[in-house]
Amino acid sequence: MLTKLAITLGLLLMTGLLVYTSAFFFSLGQGLLNAFHLALLGLMLWGWWGVWRGRLVWAGWAWGTQLLLTVGLYIIYLNS
């Protein structure tokens, strides 16, 4: 139970950090950022659901996908 709480807290904090970091890419447009933030929150919920259902791999996939989406958004920001 404590492990699940720790993983959930880590996933929540990482999502908050990525949402905060990506907010600096405001020049890409508010619509794109809103969709991106919704995707991050959806992945966080997917990972959280996986953790509490006993599928820790889902949390890893959710975290990795969040990180890749943020890096991709940063690359788009650099090229714009």
Image (cartoon, rainbow, N blue to C red):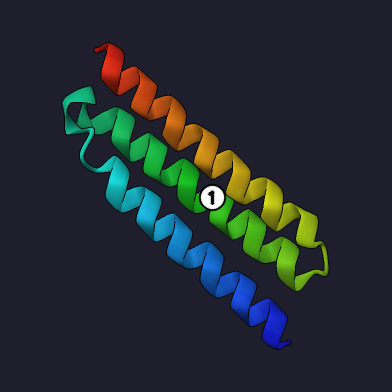
- Depicted 52 relative to depicted 23: above or below: below
Q: Position of residue 66 (x, y in %)?
A: 53, 43
At x 38%, y 59%, the residue is 16
Q: Position of residue 11 (x, y in %)?
A: 54, 63
Q: Is residue 57 left or right of residue 61?
A: right
Asked which quadrant contains residue 45, the reply is bottom right
- Depicted 54 relative to depicted 20: above or below: below
At x 64%, y 55%, the residue is 46
Asked which quadrant contains residue 51, the reply is bottom right
Towards the viewer: 54 or 35: 54
* Identity of the residue furthest to the left in this view: 27
Towards the viewer: 24 or 35: 24
At x 68%, y 57%, the residue is 59
Task: Read off the residue under disc 1.
Answer: 42
Q: Position of residue 63 (x, y in %)?
A: 59, 50
- Depicted 2 relative to depicted 44: above or below: below
Q: On the rendered image, what quadrant is the C terminus found in?
A: top left
Question: What is the secondary structure assignment of the residue under circle 1?
Answer: helix
